Every structure is written in structure tokens, then in C-alpha cells.
Image (spheres, helix red, strand yellow):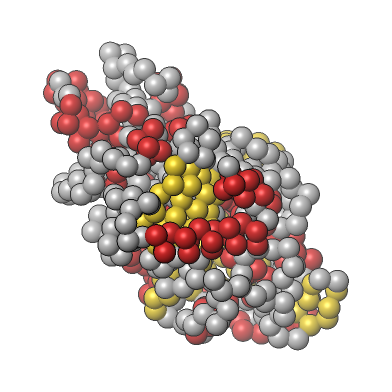
Amino acid sequence: MKTVLKHLTGIGGGIAVGLLVIPAACSQRTGKDAGRDKPMNILYIMCDDHSYQTISAYGSRLIETPNIDRIADSGMIFTNSFVANSVSAPSRACLLTGKHSHKNGMTDNTKIFDGSQQTFPKLLRQAGYQTAIVGKWHLVSEPTGFDYWNILIGQGEYYNPTFIDNGEKKVVKGYATEVTTDLALQWLESGRDTTKPFCLLLHHKAPHRTWMPDTVDLGAFDNMELPLPENFYDDYRGRPAAAAQEMEIARHMDLVYDLKMADKEGEIHTDTGLEEYGRAMYDRMDPDQKKAWDAYYDPIIEEFKKSGLSGDELTEWKYRRYMLDYLSVIRSVDRNVGKVIDYLQENGLWDNTIIVYTSDQGFYMGEHGWFDKRFMYEESFRTPMLVRYPGGYRGEVDALVQNIDHAPTFLEVAGVQVPEDIQGDSYLSLLKDGKAPEEWRDVLYYHYYEYPGEHAVRRHYGIRTDRYKLMHFYGDIDSWELYDLKEDPHEMHNVYGEEGYGKIQQKLYDELVELQKQYEDTTALKENMQ
């Protein structure tokens, strides 16, 4: 296995201060229209649960995303982008610290992020950048290292959300995606110091469960055909952890909470414990929002009540409703990404701003019969990543990258020395010419911790190469899984222990242990030895 080297030198000249390099160009800035005489601005746009399957730049047949595609068309599309832990809060901690979950302490959604630790916004701020985060935070503790923060509480609400504006709670009327975008643009326009380069983290709630569309997008996809994924009726044979989960559309998707069947008569009830929350989400709306919502959903509710669906017909109806709502939410995301791009272009920032569009993890669009994420299987492990680097490479990039790589990349872009304890690796060379250094990784490491927990996905860790994936589920289910992604891209056939895979199985196991030692994941190493 190749060992990844740290990029310890900055770009351009500067004055060294401890571990930092203050770019010499900081003294030459003259405002937001100064162009290339300034250090590169950084705009990081991250959605929550946006699947690569629903971005047209990735070849999606489900939806057109022309504005998100503008980033790919003028930059690059990463075809092998992955996360280190596919669940919201841990993924965000990996982004901020450039470290795996066991190192930053945010192993699952029940933890509280230690805001006193080193993060890339803090290092950028020390180097002369102005830093801001707007939208979803989900790390419980208050943001640190930001000049401006205006964040949603917890998961946030789709309608009339409550924000915490630098410590002050405010209910903001409107739709979350629109509101988050407008707050970010307000900061870019009048809240920041235009004599400084900026790093803005624009974090959308969308398209997180429960996929509530904006009123202007209701019904936008109702006439489209939605074929079932070919493994929708997966029987999970040979995969005990997959069989034991609780994230099936058929059995676990709530009619009221997830699918908006909150009838006015109160005749539809569910037994998941989520019905009350589903009705409360509707109650957040103002009269005009409710009027538009009712005009769309009331006829659907009435038709559903009359249909008497059951069995596979009910399951497939649920899948279709889920997908129509999810795609409608993405439509708003794409529209608002367009607003941000337009602002950059119209205000002299387009040619001096690196733009990253990604998600905190992937998501299941019915594959294996599922919604949600968490597993190391491809749909949740893989995440979209589109990047525009002004003057850089344009096209596809197939190098293996991970969300722990953003922090060192942004530091190198800014001319800041990357601290030795950061575990990710800068992909700046990929942005410049599309070519990976000779020392670039050829294997990725993953570890998921949240069990017992929502959706009952067992703890597991594993590695992925360009062709193979080895996983170990541990705890009350102790099982190994091995997949040949070339022969079995949908991960339906676990070949662990099968004849003909002995050599590759041993090689992957040795690489797994080596990575666990490199990343100092002692918990996983102990599990390997049991």
C-alpha cells in the first residue's frame, strides 16, 4: 500500500508564524473586485444527504441539475469521492479537523464536538482569512474559529426555521434552502471585510429527511417515470448486518412523518413513534404556506385513503412518493446554487474563488430497498464532489479522495502549512492539473460507530480500493464481507471466504491492519484480534 505524504509547504511567499504561513498577498488586497492579486477565496457548499445518483453531472436519469452542473462544467467532477463515517455530525467533524472520527472525538450523532480543538477555519483565520458558516451545523457545541456564524438548531426545519445568529435565536420566515442561501449572500455582500480573503461554509439542511419541498416545487416531478432500482427487492442473503437494519422503505418509512399523509381527519396513524413529529412540521407553516401545501397534498392523501394499498403495491407507492419529494427538494437546492454562482460572477469573485459542492455523505435512492445512509456500501459511502478551481483542471478525476482531505487542501490553497496531525491529504495538485502525486493513496479507510442507534446499522470498519471492498461488522453481529466491485457493483454477493478470493482477501486484510495502525484506530485493531 502506498503511504501518503503530507504537503508541508505553502503556495507563494509568506512570513512564517509558528505552524502558519501568512500569505504575502494579504497586504495587497484592495476589495472584492481586485481579482487575482488576492489569495484564493474558498466557498464550500455542502448539502445533507445529497446522493450522487441525483446530480445530472454524474449521469443521473432522475433529475437535471443545471446549476450544480455549472461547477462541473467549469471545473472537475470527482468520480471516487468518499466519506470516513457516513452520518451527519461525524462527517462534519471530519471536514473541520481533517481527521478520522476516533481522532476528533465525534464518533456518532450522540456526541458533542470539542470546539477547542484545531480546525482548518481557525488556522485560516490566523492566516488572515475571514471565516463564516451559514446553515446546518449539527455539532451541538457553538461554532469556534468563525468571524460570523448563523446556524440552524440541530437538524433544522424546512419551513420558517430557527437560526442562531452569533448566539441569538431568530425565527426566519421562508423555506430553509432559500433562507440559508440569502443569509450567506447577505454576508458576502455586506457582512464581510472585503479587504480579506474569505472562507464561507454554506451548509444546507436539504435534502435531509423528511424531504419537504418548497411550495413552488410541489408536483414538479409527478409526471415522470420512476423505475425501481434493480436490487430494490434485495433479500440480503449472505449479509446478516444488511438484513438486520431498520431503514427499509417497505417497513420503516413512516406514512405521516416521511410521506406527508397527515390527514385533517386524523384517520391515518402509524406505529413508528414519528406521527406526532410529522404533524408538528406542518404546524410550523404560515397560512399561505399551508394553503399551497394543502392544495397539493390533500388530494394525494384522499386518493391514498381510498386505494387500500398493501404488500408490494404499498411499498412501491411509498418509494415513488419518497422519490418525488426528494427530487423536488433537490430542485430548490439547484436553483439556489445558481443564485450563489450568479452572485460570484456578477461581483468579481468568480475568478478568484475555489468552489466545492458536496454532501456530508451519500444516500439510498431505493437501492437494497433502503433510504438513509450509514453503511459502507457504495450509495452511502460515496459522496458527490464537484470543484471549480480557477485556472485549474477541467474534467473527470478518478483519484480516491475523502472528506478528511478538504481541510489540508484549503490550508494549502491559502498558503498555510498543514499540521502533522491532520490525517487527510491535500488534493490541490489534482485541482491544478488533474494528476495525483506518485505517493497518492490507493486505498480508503472507513469506520461507523452509531449502534445501538437509529436504523440499527451495526458498527463496522473497512477499506476500499479501486476494485475491492473489505468490511468487518462487529458487536452483536460479527461478520466479514468482501466485494469485487468490478464484477458486483451493486454489492449483492459477499465473496468473503469463497474459493478464488483467498489471496486478495489476505492482501486486503493486511492493508486494513496497516491503515488502522497508520491512523491509530486502536478500537478497530482490537476487534481484528478477537
Residue 241: x %, y % from top left: 41, 38
Check the image and report above or below for 451 versus 385: above
**Where residue 100 sits: x, y (%)?**
62, 54
**Residue 17 percent across, percent down from the top left:** 85, 74
- Give the quadrant of residue 242: top left
Asked if residue 295 can be seen in this view, the reply is: no
* Residue 266 position (above or below residue 518): above
Q: Is residue 48 left or right of residue 407?
A: left
The answer to whether residue 92 is above or below residue 320 is below
The total of numbered circles placed on residues is 0
**Residue 387 drawn at (x, y percent):** 48, 70
Q: Nearer the viewer, residue 494 or 214?
A: 494
Left/right placement of residue 391 relative to residue 492 reads right
Who's the residue at 46% across and 73% down the image? Answer: 399
Farthest-out residue, right: 18
Give the position of the C terminus as an image quadrant.
top right
Nearer to us in this view, 308 or 135: 308
Q: Is residue 22 visible?
A: yes
Q: Is residue 406 above or below residue 133?
A: below
- At x 60%, y 72%, the residue is 3
Residue at the image position 38 percent from the left and 66 percent from the top: 467
Query: As rendered, which of 298 and 70 lies closer to the eye?
Result: 70
Q: Residue 66 sits in which quadrant?
A: bottom left
The N terminus, quarter of image: bottom right
* Residue at 48% in and 68% down: 400
